[in-house]
């Protein structure tokens, strides 16, 4: 079975931006696109009682029309794209985590400052990014178009998670026919590791995985690794980071680095997670 690209759609601007990016990724990967709408409240996230004790509501006609309109707009722009739309009787976070078991990639929309909007209902975005069974692409909704030019950026810190991120980033750079930029952020005065060695090892692995791939290794020094990566993302089309790390990248999804990237990066952020694994 061909695993699809899955995008959560609720009609909000962030989710529409995510759907557009998901369509582009589906085209690059020659995958079908599934637009999914989880239409129940996320129980446990601000709902004081169970509103469904008398039975689950049926899918909404308005939501179905919204999904079909989004699908029609996307196939109008990408005629070769296969799009399926579906409403699911589940909370948005739980629905996307479940869908991720059969997905090649889950794409989420985010408005950046203030957390996730609409579809993701605050902490649900973190729930999906933390517990998905596949990689997760977070697309910030901004006033500017989602960047398509520029290199793919990957954070390197020597952890297994970062190694996975480098592999995913190499694949993305090859698909987009662009440069892969490997970045290690060393804190000022911290000589406990070998940053040049980390970058050289990661660069050799990336070049070995993709013949002809252009790889640039970049060492940055900063007391704020999260801000350094945000600044570097201004020239990138995509940032790829591991779901767990060490040193400056520790606790990506629960700590400051991941939250800062998701909220402030100037381009989409791909959270590299192994397929079939939920954190």
Image (cartoon, rainbow, N blue to C red):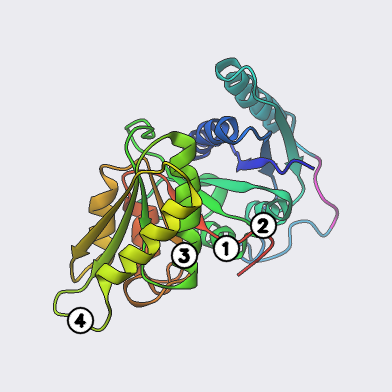
Mark 1 → mark 2, Cα distance in angstroms: 8 Å
The location of residue 159, given as percent across then percent down, is 44, 73
Of pointers 4 and 1, the one earlier in the residue sequence:
1
Read off the residue under disc 4: 191
- Say whether residue 68 is left or right of residue 267: right
The span shown in magenta is: 54-58
Tag 4 and tag 1, C-beta contact below 8 Å: no
Residue with the most extreme left position:
189
The location of residue 182, given as percent across then percent down, is 33, 56
Q: With respect to residue 156, does 248 lie above or below?
A: below
At mark 3, the secondary structure is helix
At mark 1, the secondary structure is helix
Q: Nearer the viewer, residue 95 or 118?
A: 95
Q: Quadrant of the C terminus?
A: bottom right
Of pointers 3 and 1, the one earlier in the residue sequence:
1
- Dividing the picture into quadrants, the one containing residue 187 is bottom left
Please give the label number shown on residue 127: 1
């Amino acid at each position: 079975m061909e695993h699809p690209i899955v995008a959560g759609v609720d009609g909000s601007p962030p989710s529409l931006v995510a759907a557009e990016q998901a369509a582009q990724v589906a085209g690059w990967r020659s995958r079908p696109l599934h637009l999914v709408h989880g239409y129940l409240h996320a129980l446990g996230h601000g709902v004081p009682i169970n509103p469904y004790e008398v039975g689950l509501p049926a899918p909404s006609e308005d939501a179905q029309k919204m999904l079909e309109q989004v699908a029609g707009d996307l196939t109008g722009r990408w005629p070769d794209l296969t799009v399926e739309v579906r409403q699911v009787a589940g909370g948005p976070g739980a629905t996307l985590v479940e869908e991720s078991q059969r997905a090649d990639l889950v794409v989420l929309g985010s408005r950046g400052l203030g957390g996730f909007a609409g579809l993701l209902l605050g902490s649900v975005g973190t729930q999906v990014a933390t517990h998905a069974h596949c990689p997760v692409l977070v697309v910030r909704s901004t006033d500017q178009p989602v960047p398509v030019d520029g290199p793919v950026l990957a954070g390197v810190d020597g952890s297994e998670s970062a190694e996975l991120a480098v592999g995913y980033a190499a694949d993305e750079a090859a698909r987009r026919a662009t440069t892969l930029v490997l970045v290690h952020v060393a804190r000022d005065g911290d000589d406990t590791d070998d940053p040049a060695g980390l970058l050289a090892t990661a660069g050799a692995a990336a070049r070995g995985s993709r013949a002809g791939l252009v790889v640039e290794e970049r060492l940055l020094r900063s007391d704020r690794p999260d801000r350094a990566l945000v600044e570097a993302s201004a020239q990138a089309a995509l940032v790829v980071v591991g779901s767990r790390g060490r040193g400056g990248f520790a606790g990506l999804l629960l700590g400051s680095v991941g939250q800062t990237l998701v909220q402030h990066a100037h381009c989409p952020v791909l959270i590299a997670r192994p397929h079939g694994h939920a954190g």
